[in-house]
Amino acid sequence: MSERILLTGGTGFFGRRIAEALRARGHKVVTPGRPDFDMMDSASTLRTLEQVRPETVVHSAAHYGGLGICVAEPIAIFHRNVVMGANLFDAAAKVGVKKILAVGSACAYPGQVAGDMKESDFWSGPLHPSVEAYGFTKKVLEVALRAYNKGQGIIGQMPIVTNLYGEYDVFGEYRSHVAAALIKKFADAVQSGAKEVVCWGTGAPVREFIYSADAAEAVARLLESGYTEPLNVGTGIGTTIKELSEIVARLTHFQGEIVWDTTKPDGVLRKVLDVSKMESVLNWRPPTSLEAGLAKTIKWYLANKAEADARN
Ligand code: GDP
């Protein structure tokens, strides 16, 4: 059944993919943005919700980035994400929204989980210090979903999304996550003829990567599933940062040397989700392999380099 959905962050890297996936399923999606819809301002947030009168809110907007910005800007990350979420939930409750889906993150898991992270591990220990501020704001959203469900019967849903990559990402070193950062570094090196590319850390950490359009499809499926427990969204496949760098080097035709700057942080040593619940609840698996998704992303990046480099 078609729903009237207000999507926050709907013009951003992930949000625009969520908008596409929801519209492809026949939903009416409104994607208000700044300056008219400023979620740091409670009055502006309420005004927009009153105008749109959505049945459902999908909250994808976040002040976020890779390990670099998480280490450099913990206050802005904490403050902006908590205030945006609080204002949005308050306004949604005031206008009688029936359902809220808040996009969660694998960063919200404890920093040390043995093996793949299961939904039951979510509250089992402290977060990794490198991403604590960002990760905890996603935990706050999970608690908010439960509170608004208990207090006002609003249905709450949370996909816990693993590391995303894809077209329209942020590629600059300061804010980028590793996949986009490496695509830019290797592409730049090929363009300038540089003999080496410097990557952060040891290359040993293991991450899981999901193509953004696949993760958006999972969000759309979750919304329609009626499932209300937090649900991991990923591929379940771990790749070391060293392996990732080698794939990106090959796909960009970089022939030089890869150097590891161990003065830069590794972050969490292993972050891979257990996706067995996702496969049964959504009856689906992400179709895009890491190689295929990276190839598409690199093609897009090279065709839109100036625009992509300017987004920081
Ligand atoms: P995380 O998953 O929250 O740790 O965020 P990132 O995607 O930013 O980093 C993942 C891993 O990639 C970490 O171990 C980083 O040290 C490593 N890495 C290697 N080179 C880079 C780089 O140029 N930028 C970023 N952001 N990470 C890098």
Image (cartoon, rainbow, N blue to C red):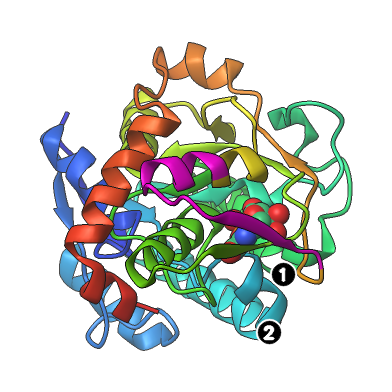
Residue 209, x across and y down, in percent: 52, 39
Residue 124, x across and y down, in percent: 86, 40
148 is higher (above) or lower (below) than 99: below
Q: Earlier in the sequence, mark 2 or mark 1?
A: 2
Which residue in the protein does label 1 denote?
133
Residue 257 in sight here: yes
Residue that appears at 38% across and 61% down? 190
Q: Is residue 22 left or right of residue 217?
A: left
Image quadrant of ligand 1 equals: bottom right
Residue 144 in sight here: no
Residue that appears at 40% across and 57% down? 59
Q: Amino acid at mark 1?
A: Ala
272 is higher (above) or lower (below) than 196: above
Residue that appears at 46% across and 37% down? 210
The kind of secondary structure element at disc 2 is: helix
> Local crowd at mark 1 within 10 Å, few (<14), some, or many (≥20)?
many
Q: Quadrant of residue 51?
A: bottom left
Q: Quadrant of the N terminus?
A: top left
Residue 189 lies within the magenta run: no
The kind of secondary structure element at disc 1 is: helix
Which residue in the protein does label 2 denote?
75
> Local crowd at mark 2 within 10 Å, few (<14), some, or many (≥20)?
few
Residue that appears at 68% across and 82% down? 72
Q: Residue 164 versus residue 255: which sits nearer the camera?
A: 255
Q: Do the numbered discs 2 and 1 sit on residues whose CB atoms are within 8 Å?
A: yes
277 is higher (above) or lower (below) than 181: above
Q: Quadrant of the C terminus?
A: bottom left
Q: Residue 47 versus residue 266: which sits nearer the camera?
A: 266
Q: Amino acid at mark 2?
A: Ile
Q: Which residues are magenta?
A: 246-262
